[in-house]
Amino acid sequence: MPTKTPQPTAPRPAPPLREIRKVLIANRGEIALRVIRACRELGIRTVAVYSTVDEHALHVRFADEAVCIGPGPSSQSYLNIKNIIAAAELTGADAVHPGYGFLSERAEFAEIVQKCKLTFIGPDPSHMRVMGDKVMARQTMERSGVPVLPGSGVLTSAAHAVAEAERIGLPVILKASAGGGGRGMKIVRDIKLLPQTLQTAQVEALKAFGCGDMYLERYVQSPRHVEVQVVADQHGNANHLLERECSVQRRHQKVLEEAPCSVLSEPLRREMCAAAVAAAKAIGYHSLGTIEFLLDGDRFYFMEMNTRVQVEHCVTEMITGIDLVQEQIRLATGEPLGHLMREFRPRGHAIECRINAEDPIKFAPQPGTISALHFPGGYGVRVDSHMYQGITVPPYYDSMLGKLIVHAPDRQQAIRRMQRALGECVIEGIQTNIPLHRWLLKQPAFISGKYDTHFLESSLDPEAVRAEADAEAQA
Ligand code: MV4
């Protein structure tokens, strides 16, 4: 097998505590606000960076200082490492928070931040590299006793691929070793099609990721996506903060998330959460992290690890009472897990709807100006959003306007609370996916909790979503 043998990171001596007094947030939108809020409560000063189209953005207004780092396109601003580092040096920041997306999982960025004597609020670049290489991640997990699907190493030829597929059994899925999040995957049901599919996939992966390495896995037909939140300190301690159910997706974009997962039995939850902690310990991980699993009946398999704070972290916050971003900052200073070391039990149920600026039926992004805005409130409702009345949503970034999160004693009450909150939501001037959410929350498959990763795309009913949009317009 030509595949590199992964070496789990050896335990390191814990570094001394590094004080954080000023954080530069290398991001925009709701997550930049989320980090600023955590910093303010911790008594830490904040530096926003922004592109010219974000001059009036809330993250710029809420931060103590702000530095313009370039024009609208992210390649010239939020991905512009030189300008971001210059902004940190100019303002005397001592730490950098990458948020999610943009530079958050780029090992080279974390490395540059560290070389500039700044604290990276996240794991080591080495952790990002192991988990960014999906073949290495799989092998490391397998060796650590974390369940993985039958699969191959990097495929060296069409003949090798066919031999491996025959050993694994059809159907199989071809994945790019440098991919992730659903990018660069192809399902193969007929062995005759494997050589051609492999070649196409290699070319595409090389173009998209700069690496054409592909591997095979047994394909699971109707899985659920369940992920476990882990926390780890720089002293070798790791723990979990329960799981999130994220199966409501479209084209690998999550649409709605909940915590806990309504179909996990208590023994299975314990097993999955223990596997996630073992995964983090296997690489000597520190900071916040998420272990994604495919759940197939009562079996689960490691998929990927995300080494950043995730969009859906809020549902975990609601059911655990832990401010994950504050903890992430605290862990970056070298503090031990402390109060995070206890056993967490789900406290009620939380649901998050991602509110996007898009056509609710065709899903095309809808940049534009918000002419009227009213967010819901009341007991058990949380809104994490960077919107304000009059904002012009630029076309350069993702279309998420914010997140509506509810918390209630049980799942049924959480669904009712979300329906109530969506009913209070007013966003005029641009189309949003709120009608899609209103439709979704009425679906018997959703209400019963018996859905998998194909549910949204297979049961989407444009007429019914249109009816929700019309009903909303009437109200
Ligand atoms: C799979 C799979 C079935 N079998 N792997 C998509 C995202 C990436 N994390 C892994 N993904 C999948 N990997 C095997 N061996 C099905 C998916 C998948 C999926 C996973 C989670 C949520 C939504 C999904 C939608 C389609 C496919």
Image: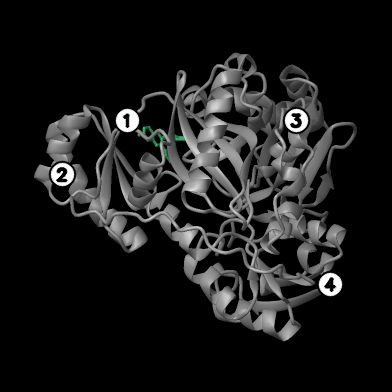
Give 183 or 303, whichever is nearer the viewer: 303
Give 409 or 265, whichever is nearer the viewer: 265
In space, the residues marked 4 and 1 are separated at their CA atoms by 49 Å
Circle 3/circle 4 CB separation < 8 Å: no
Q: Residue at x 72, y 28 (%)?
A: 345
Ligand 1 within 8 Å, label 2 CB: no
Q: In this figure, which residue is indicated by the disc labeled 2?
A: 196
Give percent across and percent down for residue 376.
84, 37
At label 1, the amino acid type is Tyr
The earlier-in-sequence mark between 3 and 1 is 1
Q: Quadrant of ligand 1?
A: top left
Q: Residue at x 71, y 85 (%)?
A: 90
Quadrant position of the C terminus in the picture:
top right
**Is residue 360 rendered to the left or right of residue 166?**
right
Ligand 1 within 8 Å, label 1 CB: yes
The earlier-in-sequence mark between 2 and 4 is 4
User: Judging from the image, what secondary structure is the residue with disc 1 in?
Assistant: loop
The earlier-in-sequence mark between 4 and 1 is 4
Dot 3, how many residues are within 10 Å of its Cα: few (below 14), some (14-19), or many (20+)? Answer: some
